Structures are given as C-alpha cells and as structure tokens.
Amino acid sequence: MDMPDVGVAVSTGAVGTFVGAVVAWWKAKQPRKIEPDPLHVERTGPFVTCGECKQHRAAIGKRIDTIETSTRTIINKLDEIDTRAEQRSENLHRRLDPIIEKVAGNSAKIEMFDAVIREAAKATTAGGKK
C-alpha cells in the first residue's frame, strides 16, 4: 500500500469521528421525548389533612343543625297557621248555622203554604159551573 492511501483513510476516519462527536453532542442538547409517555405524572392540588377534613365535616354538621332548627320553626309556624285557619272556619260555620236554620224553616213554611194554596185552589175550582 502506498502512503497516500493510508493518509486518506486516516483523514477520512478522523473526519467521521469528528462528525460523529458533533452529532452526539447535538443530540445530547436536544430534549428527548418518549412516546407514549409511561411515566407521565400530573401535579395535583394540595392534599387535605385529617384535621382539615374533621373541621370541614364539623362545619357542615353545624350548617345542617341550623337548617334543621329553621325547618322545625317553619313547620311549627305552618301548623299554627293551619290551626288558626281551621278555628276561623269553625267560627264562621257557627255564625252561619242560625241563618241556615232560619232559611230552612222558612223554606219548609213556604212549601207548606204552597201546598195549602194548591189545595184551596183545587177546592174552589172543583165544584164550579159547567
């Protein structure tokens, strides 16, 4: 082999090594992305401690107790209103009962009077001239 062939081979190898080193350095600088990402982790908000959970449950319990007492108060007021309305209705009926009795009595008298008038009218026309 001739010497110039060896020099070309050595210089080609040197250039190849240099280019390989530059490519390796460039790839190292580029961010790598693995598809699909098996280790993807999303950040979550702060976790709740047991103490904070107990405080939250206690606050909700107090709100429920307040709502229950308010509901009981409303139900008691509705019962009271219903009782008063029923009492007013009974009182109204008591005041109207005498009027209804008098109207019924007058109606019976009118029917009796009407029957008497009909009988009298029949009697007066039964023996008339022919």
Image (cartoon, helix red, strand yellow):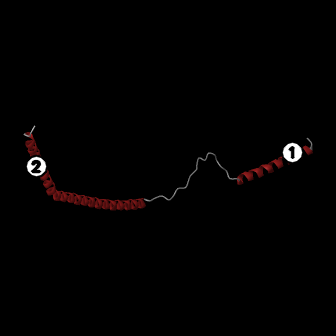
Left or right position of 50 against 32: left
Q: Is residue 114 above or below residue 86?
A: above
Q: Percent from the top left, x then y, of residue 17?
A: 80, 49
Mark 1 residue type: Ala
Mark 2 residue type: Phe
Along the viewing direction, whichever of 10 and 130 lies nearer the viewer: 130
Secondary structure category for the residue under label 2:
helix
Along the viewing direction, whichever of 75 and 84 lies nearer the viewer: 84
Q: Percent from the top left, x then y, of residue 6?
A: 89, 44
Q: Residue, x 29% and y 62% (percent of image)?
A: 73
Q: Earlier in the sequence, mark 1 or mark 2?
A: 1
Q: Residue, x 35% and y 62% (percent of image)?
A: 62
Q: Percent from the top left, x then y, of residue 95?
A: 16, 59
- Residue farthest along the top direction in this orientation: 130
Q: Is residue 128 above or below residue 94?
A: above
Mark 2 and mark 1 in contact (Cβ < 8 Å)? no
Residue at the disc numbered 1: 9
Crowd rating for badge 1 (residues with CA inside 10 Å; few <14, some 14–19, many 20+): few
Left or right position of 107 against 14: left
Mark 1, mark 2: which one is toward the viewer?
Answer: 2
Residue at the disc numbered 2: 113
Q: Percent from the top left, x then y, of residue 87?
A: 20, 59
- Residue farthest along the front direction in this orientation: 130
What is the CA distance from the residue labelled 1 to the residue labelled 2? 149 Å
